[in-house]
Structure formats: structure tokens, C-alpha cells
Image (spheres, rainbow, N blue to C red):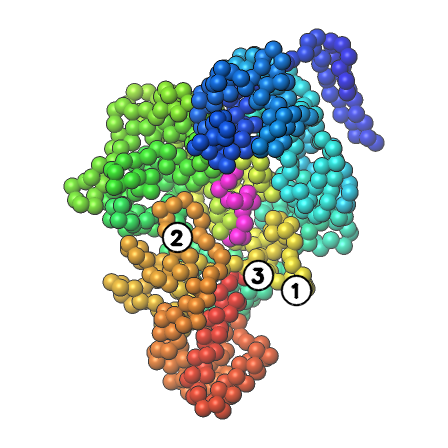
């Protein structure tokens, strides 16, 4: 449509028996949007790399032109661009001749090459700013919101096209077609490519996010590409609950077939390891397999969630997330924090109340264990608490938002600003720490006064929620309680969604939003309806975790096999993104070590703990067990996920490390126990397989192993040594080291 004159018109669109009516209003004036130095110009300098460390953001700048790194000091940048060197970088009489445009557009030679093509949106944004007088603070009409239509679309067939329309909503209430004014980006250009501004071409099957940026605003759309639509022979799947309805519906839309249901033996091993972090015993596996009731999987899940191992297993996960760590620079109260975490998990205490306790905690770290939550944000050598360190912890844990970059500069690709970062920091401005009455005792308390200085305005930062509201706290009110109530409010769009996505990630190895703690408009959920439904389920069940675990574990989506109808070829990225199968993954360090103890019959020994103590139940000292650190136990003093990539150290440790060697060679291990019962070689091999894989060996496997044992005996190496090599091989196998 093209506006011709002021007025309104009804637009009716019809297709077959369907129709839709819209009213369009045309004003009698055109609206020129005001370009602001912050964030509009600064965002362009950031996204183009002009203020990066390898360009003008370096300590010395480039050729006399120095910008703050990523725009953290906008005032200094404005002075440098507009006023420094007698203002030679701008020309308000002839803006297009300004050095700030002519150099990056390569109208005149520029060492950085052409970074602002004259036909680009960024070039015209800076040009508009110059034409408007290159002001530091500008009033007038501004772009408040940017939207893309359609915001979800599936393209069928390589080469198919889709046009996108970018609509800007302005501060004066009007809207504007900005399709040719925005910059379009695509997260994965192997899925779709740009045929022309605003028009995409399908390339290969996949799911990706398309972004449009303009004037500091970002809009996104999720675009899928499939080769063909699901045909009439698409497999029908029996849904166990609402998760399956939503997962299988999305898979059918994207024409991705789900894998078959896992076998009973495959499922029993998987759910034991995922839910409680141990292997099923041969007897437990056999009992489950022989059970004939239709609801036996649901019954098994209920029994696992009531076992003490469930508490130990998930306590370790929350210790990772809460960074319960004992370093020399921290106190010695991490044990009380572990016990406190274990207690509320065992009681299935509502998580919203747990978060309230964490965020409002104060007092002695031994007497009030929740106060240990603040330790990672503290430098105890300097006896100083850093609000800048606690903001990323709170935002990632409870909101699923990564705000680290907003500490120094506005996010170049997101609607996150320094105001957002320091607005959250202001809630913690009065929290302090001091040494307690013991050498390692810490006491947290609140001062009556205290503010966080905004690095740009140099004035106290106002408290601000991420949604934009700026609350007022009455005198004497703990600011943190105001933040805590907003975070756990059922209407909060972040908390429940971020929490269920984190738990989902633990079971599937990939989140509905991935990375699981990186919610943003440019990182859309692969199944928004599923994420919202899980969040509602979590809230309706009073923020308790057991109902969440139960509904996920009972879903057919979780119970799908990791093995497809045919084992040839690599699984597609869509299978992972849409949860079409269970993806095998490495066992966590504690689970792996305990599982080795289960298979060998020799539990790992920890100094100062009684025999048989699980690695999940120990209080990690300054130097964790070498096996645990080798296989991925995290430092916990930094905010990062466990590393899951295999390493050379791990391979060498399993080849000749003491932890495994001593267990295999022990006379009291499983081999010693079974040979003492005069069990034959086939029986011993069967027991090893049952312990490690929750299944008996196939006839082919048994034949291969027995041939090996016979050859070892013929070589004069003895029965015990032959069986030790079998045990070692099983523990070093992928089938044992992975949950599948």
C-alpha cells in the first residue's frame, strides 16, 4: 500500500471463504525520527567494530582518533567525534562530507576499509544525525519498537521465497514501513539467504532466526526451511502428556520424524542416570523389564524421585549453578550451603521461596547458609563485595539473560542497555560484607545508605526492572526484597521460563532456548508454545521441581530412542533442535566415578569419609579429587557450564590412572566376588554387561569376549588377568561412558 492523502480506509483481504478486514489511517504529515547519539550512533560504531580493541577502541586509538572500548564512555566519544581537533570530523553545512562518514564509507582512503556503504542503513542513520545537528541529547520523535511480519514462517523447498516487512512504532503513536531502512541479518545463512532487502530465499533444511536492526531497536522472526511437507504416511505418535502434543506438532510442521520409543533396558539405564545419577543394579533392571503393568515407566519415575540419590544428584547441579565453592579467598561455610540446598530439594520446597531467601539473605554465612550465595561476587582478599559481579549471576540464574556486556556498553544486537545493567545493580547497592568472629566467618549486612554510580551520567543509578518499570522503595525497605518479588511474580516473563528451560537442558542436552541461560530477542525458543506451557505447569504446581521432573520424564519425547531406524548418516540439526531423539552425552564426573564403583564393586575412597561415600555427597575441599577435576568438575568461582569435551588427560587417566587401575586389580572387586562363587566366564561377562549397560551381552558380543579370554589363557596370562582386561574394556567403551 502507498499512502496518497490524509484519511482512513478499510482494507479487506479474501482467500476462498476466509477474509480479514483492517483499517488503515494516513496522517497529513510525515514523521522524521530523531537519531540519538546514544544508543543509535554508538550502536553502529559497536556493531561495525569501529570501537573494538583492534580499531579505534584500542588504548592508543588509530591515527589520533580514539573511542572508548565498545562505547562504554559515550561522553568521551561524543567529545572526540564532534569537538576534538577543532571539530574537523563533522561538517554540519555539508554533512555528507563529514570525515565521520567519508572515511568509513571509503569516499576517501580509510585504513579500515569500507565499513559503512553509502546505501546502507547505518550510513543514513549517522547522516540523519548530522543533518539534525549532531546533538548529544536529542528530543523529538523516536523509534520505540520494531516488528517483523511474519514473525514465524516455514518455507517449503529450496529456492522458495518469503518477503518480510519491518514496521516501526514511533513515540508519537504512528507506524512506519521501515523495510528499506533496517539492516537484515540471519543467524544461520546455510538455512536462508537474502535475495534482496527484505526478501529471503530458502537454502537447506533447518531453523534459524532473522533479525532486523534500526535506530537501536531489534526485531526478530523465526524461519524454518523444509524440503517437503509431511505426507499422509507421516508416523503417528501416541502422546503421553502436553509436552508430546507440542513437540510432535512442531516436528510434523517441520516434517521431522520422531525416533522410535526406547526399549525398556535403554530407558531404565537412562532414567536412573538422568534422574538420580547412578546405574540400576542388575536386579533393578531385570525387575523393571519383567514388569507387565502398562504404567511401569511412570511407577519407576515416581520411585526414583523419592529416593535419596535424587536429592544428592540434583544438589550437585544446584551447587554448580549457585557456584558453591570453597577457595582460599572464600569462607569455610560451603558445607552449610550444601546441606541447606539438599534440605530444600529433599522437601521439594517451592523454588520461588528459595529464590526469595537467597536474594534477601543476610547474616553469618554459617548460621544463615543462604548468604553463601553472595560469595562468588566477593573479593575477600580486598574484603569487598562487587555489585557488578552479582548482576550477571542473578540475571542468568533467575532471568535467563546474559547481561555481562551491558556493564561496559549498550548491547550492540539487543535491546539491553547500561541503564538495564546498573538498574539491577542498584538493588544491591547497600549490601556489605565483613569478617565474622572466626577466621573464616563472614557476615553480610545492609547499610542505611549507598548507591551505584552510573558510568555515563556519573549520578546514582535508579532501580529498574528489565521490563522497564522503575520501582520506588520506601525508607527502611530492603531493596533486594523488591527485586525478589518482581523476579518470582507469576506475571514475570523471565523466571519460570528460564527455570524450566534449565531443567529441560539437563535432560535433553539442549534447551528450548540454547544456550539455556541466554534468552534474548535474537535467540528465539525453538518451540515457544512448549516453553510457555512448561512455565505455566511449573507455576501451577507452586514452583516445585518434582512435578516438573515427573512431566518431562513421563513424556514420550524424553523416552524416544537414541538409535534411529537406520544407523547410517549423521542426524540433522533439526532432530536436535526439535527433540526428535535422545542424544547420547557424557556422564558428569561424579556420576561417572560412582558408576565405575558400581560396576567394579569398589567404591572410590575419599580422605576423611567412610567407605562407600558417593562423590556427590562429599564437601569439596580446596583441592577436589583429581579424577573429578580431570573429568570436568568445575571451578565454580566463574560463571560457566561444565566442559563436556573429551580430553587427552581423560583418555590417559582411563588407560593407566590409579583410580581405575586399583579398582580393576582389587581382589575384592566384582571379579573376585564372582569367581569366589565358581561362576563360569560366560556368567561373569554377563554380570559385567548387566552392571555397566543394564543389558546382557548379545550372542555375538559374548562370543567375541570368550574368544579373547581363551586366547589370553592360551598365552599364559591367567584367567584373572583376562577378565580384568574385559572389565577395563567395558569401562572404556562409549556405551558405558555415555548416557543414551
The total of numbered circles placed on residues is 3
Q: Which mark is residue 634?
A: 2
| Span highlighted in magenta in the image | 507-519
Circle 1 is placed at which residue position? 567
**Which quadrant would residue 481 be assigned to in this image?**
top left
Between 492 and 71, the one nearer to me in the picture: 71
Q: Are marks 1 and 3 in contact (CB under 8 Å)?
A: no
Q: Position of residue 107 (x, y in %)?
A: 65, 25
**Which quadrant would residue 556 be assigned to in this image?**
bottom right
Q: Earlier in the sequence, mark 3 or mark 2?
A: 3
Instruction: Name which residue lies at 34% across and 30% down.
Output: 428
Disc nearest the viewer among 1 and 3: 1
Q: Which mark is residue 294?
A: 3
Res 179 seen here: yes
Q: Earlier in the sequence, mark 1 or mark 3?
A: 3
Instruction: Name which residue lies at 24% across and 62% down.
Output: 608
Amino acid at each position: 500500500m502507498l499512502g496518497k492523502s490524509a484519511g482512513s480506509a478499510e482494507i479487506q483481504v479474501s482467500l476462498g471463504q476466509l477474509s480479514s478486514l483492517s483499517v488503515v489511517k494516513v496522517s497529513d504529515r510525515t514523521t522524521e525520527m530523531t537519531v540519538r547519539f546514544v544508543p543509535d550512533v554508538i550502536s553502529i560504531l559497536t556493531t561495525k567494530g569501529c570501537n573494538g580493541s583492534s580499531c579505534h577502541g584500542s588504548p592508543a586509538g588509530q591515527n589520533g582518533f580514539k573511542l572508548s572500548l565498545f562505547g562504554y564512555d559515550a561522553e568521551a566519544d561524543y567529545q572526540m567525534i564532534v569537538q576534538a581537533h577543532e571539530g574537523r570530523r563533522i561538517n554540519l553545512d555539508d554533512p555528507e562530507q563529514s570525515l565521520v562518514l567519508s572515511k568509513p564509507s571509503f569516499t576517501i582512503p580509510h585504513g579500515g576499509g569500507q565499513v559503512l556503504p553509502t546505501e546502507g542503513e547505518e550510513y543514513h542513520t549517522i547522516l540523519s544525525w548530522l543533518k539534525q545537528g549532531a546533538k548529544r541529547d536529542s528530543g523529538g520523535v523516536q523509534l520505540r519498537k520494531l516488528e517483523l511480519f511474519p514473525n514465524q514462517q516455514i518455507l517449503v523447498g529450496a529456492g522458495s521465497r518469503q518477503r518480510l516487512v519491518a514496521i516501526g512504532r514511533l513515540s508519537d503513536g504512528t507506524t512506519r514501513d521501515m523495510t528499506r531502512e533496517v539492516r537484515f541479518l540471519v543467524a544461520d545463512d546455510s538455512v536462508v539467504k537474502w535475495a534482496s532487502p527484505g526478501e529471503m530465499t530458502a537454502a537447506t533444511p533447518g531453523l534459524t532466526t532473522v533479525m532486523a536492526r534500526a535506530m537501536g531497536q531489534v526485531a526478530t522472526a523465526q524461519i524454518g526451511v523444509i524440503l517437503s511437507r509431511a505426507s499422509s504416511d507421516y508416523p503417528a505418535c501416541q502422546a503421553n502428556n502436553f509436552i508430546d502434543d507440542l513437540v510432535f506438532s512442531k516436528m510434523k510442521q517441520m516434517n521431522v520424524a520422531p525416533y522410535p520409543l526406547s526399549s525398556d533396558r535403554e530407558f531404565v539405564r537412562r532414567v536412573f542416570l538422568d534422574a538420580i545419577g547412578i546405574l540400576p543394579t542388575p536386579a533393578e533392571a531385570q525387575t523393571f523389564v519383567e514388569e507387565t503393568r502398562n504404567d511401569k515407566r511412570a511407577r519407576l519415575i515416581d520411585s526414583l524421585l523419592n529416593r535419596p540419590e535424587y536429592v544428592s544428584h540434583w544438589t550437585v547441579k544446584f551447587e554448580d549453578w549457585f557456584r558453591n565453592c570453597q577457595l582460599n579467598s572464600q569462607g569455610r561455610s560451603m558445607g552449610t550451603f550444601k546441606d541447606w540446598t539438599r534440605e530444600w530439594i529433599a522437601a521439594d520446597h517451592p523454588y520461588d521461596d528459595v529464590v526469595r531467601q537467597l536474594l534477601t539473605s543476610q547474616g553469618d554465612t554459617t548460621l544463615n547458609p543462604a548468604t553463601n550465595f553472595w560469595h562468588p561476587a566477593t573479593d575477600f582478599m580486598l574484603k569487598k563485595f562487587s555489585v557488578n559481579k552479582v548482576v550477571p549471576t542473578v540475571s542468568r540464574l533467575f532471568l535467563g539473560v546474559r547481561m555481562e556486556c551491558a556493564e561496559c556498553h549498550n548491547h550492540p544486537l539487543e535491546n539491553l542497555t547500561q541503564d538495564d545493567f546498573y538498574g539491577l545493580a542498584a538493588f544491591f547497592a547497600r549490601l556489605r560484607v565483613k569478617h565474622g568472629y572466626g577466621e573464616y566467618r563472614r557476615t553480610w549486612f545492609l547499610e542505611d545508605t549507598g548507591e551505584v554510580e552510573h558510568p555515563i551520567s556519573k549520578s546514582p543509578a535508579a532501580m529498574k526492572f528489565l521490563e522497564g518499570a522503575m520501582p520506588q522503595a520506601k525508607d527502611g525497605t530492603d531493596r533486594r526484597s523488591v527485586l525478589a518479588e518482581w523476579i518470582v511474580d507469576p506475571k514475570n516473563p523471565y523466571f519460570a521460563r528460564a527455570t524450566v528451560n534449565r531443567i529441560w537442558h539437563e535432560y535433553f542436552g539442549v534447551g528450548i532456548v540454547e544456550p539455556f541461560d541466554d534468552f534474548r530477542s535474537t535467540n528465539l525458543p525453538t518451540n515457544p508454545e512448549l516453553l510457555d506451557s512448561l512455565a505455566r505447569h511449573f507455576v501451577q504446581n507452586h514452583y516445585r521441581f518434582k512435578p516438573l521432573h515427573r512431566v518431562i520424564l513421563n513424556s514420550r519425547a524424553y523416552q524416544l530412542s537414541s538409535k534411529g531406524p537406520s544407523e547410517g548418516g549423521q542426524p540433522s540439526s533439526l532432530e536436535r533442535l526439535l527433540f526428535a531423539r535422545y542424544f547420547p552425552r557424557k556422564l558428569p564426573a561424579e556420576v561417572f566415578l560412582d558408576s565405575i564403583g558400581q560396576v567394579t564393586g569398589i567404591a572410590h575412597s575419599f580422605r576423611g569419609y567412610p567407605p562407600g561415600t558417593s562423590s556427590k555427597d562429599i564437601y569439596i575441599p580446596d583441592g577436589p579429587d583429581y579424577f573429578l577435576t580431570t573429568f570436568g568438575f568445575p571451578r565454580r568461582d566463574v560463571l560457566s557450564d561444565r566442559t563436556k569435551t573429551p580430553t587427552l588427560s581423560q583418555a590417559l587417566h582411563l588407560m593407566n590412572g590409579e583410580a581405575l587401575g586399583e579398582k580393576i586389580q582389587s581382589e575384592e572387586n566384582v571379579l573376585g566376588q564372582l569367581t569366589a562363587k565358581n561362576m563360569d566366564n560366560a556368567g561373569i561377562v554377563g554380570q559385567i554387561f548387566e552392571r555397566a549397560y543394564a543389558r546382557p551381552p548379545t550372542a555375538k558380543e559374548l562370543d567375541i569376549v570368550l574368544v579373547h579370554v581363551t586366547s589370553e589363557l592360551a598365552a599364559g596370562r591367567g584367567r584373572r588377568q583376562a577378565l580384568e582386561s574385559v572389565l577395563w574394556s567395558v569401562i572404556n567403551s562409549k556405551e558405558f561412558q555415555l548416557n543414551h
